[in-house]
C-alpha cells in the first residue's frame, strides 16, 4: 500500500468536510492561531499540505505558506481553491524547496505516514534544512494507544457506529498500525467497503530523539493547539522543536 495509492483522486475529492470534523472551526481555529504566532512574522512551509485545510486559513491570516505534497490529486484539489500557495510535488522526507522559513509544520499525524524510522528521521533533517537559525518545526501526533492492547489482542475497535466500523490492527514488532475503515449499509447485508491506512507509530520520547538527531531541541509540548497541559493520559500532542539561534 503506497501513500500515492491511498491519496488517490477519490480520497482527494472526498477529503474536505467544510465546517465539520477536522474542518470544524473549533478544530482548525486554535491550530491556525498557534501556527500564525509561531511563524513570528516569517514564512511557513507545510509538509504534506494536502488540500490546504490548514495552509489556506493560515495564508489568509497573512502568513506566506508554501507546501510539499506527494499526491497529485490532493494538489489538484488544492488548486481548485485558487489559493496563492506554491506547492512542490514530492516526498516530504527528501524534497527541498528553499531555505529561510521561520516555521515548518507537519500536522494531523502525518509524520506516521512515513513507514520506517529512517524516513521519519530524514523528515526531521529535511525540515531543519528549510529553516533559518532559531526556526521552529511543529508536529501534531497521536500518542500510541498500546495500553488498549491486552496481551494476545492484535486489534482494537476505535469507532463502532451504524454504517461505520473502525479497526486498528497492530504489528508491535515493527511499530506499525493499520487503520481499517469499513463502511456499509446498516440495514442490508451487502458487502462492506474497506479503506486502509498504514502508519508507523512513534512515542513522544522517540520523536524527541529524532529531533535531536536533526539538531532541534524541544521547546514545548502541549496536549492540543490551545495549550492544554500534556499528561500521561493525553491522547495527542503538539510538539514544538526549535533550531539553535544564530551566533
Ligand atoms: C491526513 S492528510 C493531511 C493533509 C493536511 N496536512 C491536513 O492537515 O489536512 C495526509 C497527507 O499526507 C500526504 N503524504 C503522505 N505521505 C507523504 C510524503 N511522504 N510526502 C509528502 N506528502 C505525503 C498525503 O498525500 C496526504 O495529502
Image: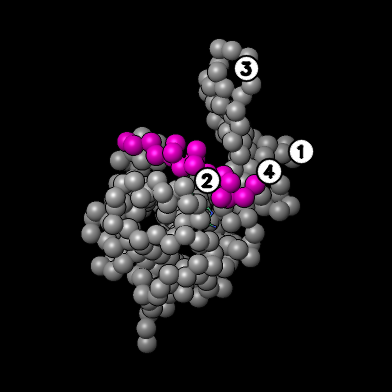
Q: Position of residue 146 (x, y in %)?
A: 64, 45
In the image, which is nearer the foreground, mark 1 or mark 3? Answer: 3
Q: Position of residue 207 (x, y in %)?
A: 55, 62
- At x 28% / y 69%, what residue is drawn? 42
Residue that carries the numbered disc 2 in the rendered image: 7
Residue that carries the numbered disc 3 in the rendered image: 190
Is 67 positioned to the left or the right of 236 in the image? left
Among numbered discs 4 and 3, the one appearing first in the sequence: 4
Which sits in the foreground, 246 or 87? Answer: 87
Return the residue found at the far right: 152
Marks 4 and 2 in Cβ contact (< 8 Å): no
Label 2 SS: loop
Q: Count neighbours of disc 4 (C-alpha within 10 A) and say few if under 14, some if 14 to 19, many if 20 or more.
A: many
Q: Which residues are magenta?
A: 1-19
Among numbered discs 4 and 2, the one appearing first in the sequence: 2
Return the residue found at the far bottom: 247
Among numbered discs 1 and 3, the one appearing first in the sequence: 1
Amino acid at each position: 500500500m503506497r501513500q500515492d495509492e491511498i491519496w488517490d483522486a477519490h480520497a482527494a475529492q472526498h477529503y474536505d468536510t467544510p465546517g465539520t470534523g477536522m474542518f470544524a472551526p473549533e478544530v482548525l481555529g486554535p491550530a491556525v492561531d498557534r501556527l500564525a504566532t509561531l511563524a513570528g512574522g516569517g514564512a511557513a512551509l507545510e509538509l504534506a499540505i494536502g488540500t490546504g485545510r490548514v495552509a489556506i486559513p493560515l495564508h489568509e491570516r497573512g502568513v506566506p505558506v508554501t507546501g510539499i505534497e506527494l499526491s497529485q490529486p490532493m494538489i489538484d484539489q488544492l488548486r481548485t481553491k485558487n489559493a496563492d500557495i506554491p506547492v512542490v510535488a514530492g516526498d516530504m522526507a527528501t524534497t527541498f524547496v528553499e531555505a529561510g522559513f521561520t516555521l515548518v509544520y507537519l500536522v494531523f499525524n502525518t509524520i506516521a505516514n512515513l513507514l520506517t524510522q529512517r524516513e521519519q528521521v530524514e523528515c526531521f533533517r529535511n525540515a531543519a534544512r528549510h529553516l533559518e537559525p532559531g526556526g521552529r518545526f511543529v508536529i501534531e501526533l497521536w500518542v500510541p494507544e498500546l495500553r488498549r492492547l491486552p496481551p494476545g489482542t492484535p486489534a482494537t475497535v476505535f469507532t463502532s457506529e451504524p454504517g461505520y466500523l473502525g479497526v486498528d490492527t497492530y504489528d508491535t514488532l515493527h511499530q506499525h498500525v493499520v487503520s481499517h475503515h469499513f463502511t456499509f449499509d446498516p440495514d442490508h447485508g451487502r458487502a462492506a467497503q474497506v479503506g486502509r491506512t498504514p502508519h508507523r507509530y512513534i512515542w513522544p520520547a522517540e520523536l524527541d530523539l529524532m529531533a535531536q538527531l536533526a539538531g532541534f531541541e524541544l521547546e514545548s509540548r502541549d496536549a492540543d493547539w490551545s495549550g492544554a497541559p500534556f499528561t500521561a493520559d493525553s491522547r495527542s500532542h503538539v510538539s514544538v522543536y526549535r533550531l539553535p539561534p544564530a551566533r
